[in-house]
Amino acid sequence: MMKQAQMWTYIFVMFLTLQSQCSACRWLGRYRILSAESLRLLGEMGGQYPENIKIHIPRRLYNLMDKAEVEDQLRFIVSTLDHIIKLMDASQHMDSVQWNPKTVAYFLKDLHRQSSELKECVSLKPPQKVSHEKRINRHFRILKKMLKKEKYSAEAWEQIRRAVRSHLQRMDIIASNAKLLLKV
């Protein structure tokens, strides 16, 4: 009798877990809309992107993520979004740029929503491989050091804005691939 009750409890918990994960991942179908809005707001912040600014983004890492498991892709996107939020949520250091504070706030709000919604798609179990986590952490640490070294100048912030645009564009591609794999 006890084993049957445990079995039904286990089945019920599994059903709820799968149902909540599937419905949460349906949001991935709307990710592209919010991502496009974030890119629009980022463009509005500073106007035309200066073409003379070159900024390194970890292309090899993105190429690896293109081929990764969907769960790892989503974890990577969430992690990168969280890094971008931390980097861009530095209003005390943005005196040198002429960005509209409301636009920056809307941009950050969009990123927060994307991150929180995608976190619902990722299981609670720890990831198997965390090498991408170390690489993306290192990349954003370099960006923060560059900002600090250049004393949060307007040019440094434009470099950051351009890097963020590249990240958002690449993450959009990864999310689209994940959506296709999940058939959402």
Image (tube, helix red, strand yellow):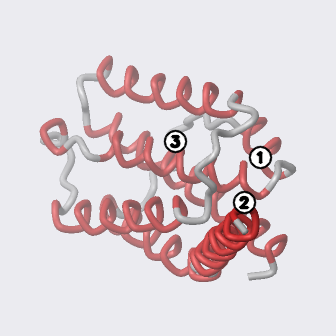
Query: What amino acid is labelled 2 in the image?
Result: Ile
Q: Is residue 6 above or below residue 20?
A: above
Left or right of 97? Residue 49 is right
Residue ID for mark 3: 52
Q: Earlier in the sequence, mark 1 or mark 3?
A: 3
Q: Residue furthest top?
A: 149
Which residue is nearer to you in this view: 153 or 31?
Answer: 31
Residue ID for mark 2: 174
Considering the numbered disc 3 on the image, is that residue within a helix, a strand or a loop? loop
Which residue is nearer to you in this view: 99 or 72?
Answer: 72
Q: Is there CB contact under 8 Å for labels 2 and 1?
A: yes
Which residue is nearer to you in this view: 96 or 89?
Answer: 89
The C terminus lies in quadrant: bottom right
Q: Quadrant of residue 125?
A: top right
Q: Residue at x 65, y 56 (%)?
A: 74
**Where does residue 36 sit, x and y in percent of width and height?**
52, 75
Considering the numbered disc 1 on the image, is that residue within a helix, a strand or a loop? helix
Q: Residue furthest front?
A: 1
Residue ID for mark 1: 65
Task: Judge the density around disc 2: few (<14), some (14-19), many (≥20) Cα neighbours within 10 Å.
Answer: many
Marks 1 and 3, how far apart in space? Answer: 28 Å
Left or right of 29? Residue 42 is left
Q: Residue at x 17, y 45 (%)?
A: 91
Left or right of 45? Residue 78 is right
Marks 2 and 1, how far apart in space? Answer: 7 Å
Q: Earlier in the sequence, mark 2 or mark 3?
A: 3
Q: Quadrant of residue 6?
A: bottom right
Q: Earlier in the sequence, mark 2 or mark 1?
A: 1
Q: Residue at x 41, y 65 (%)?
A: 43
Query: What amino acid is labelled 1 in the image?
Result: Met
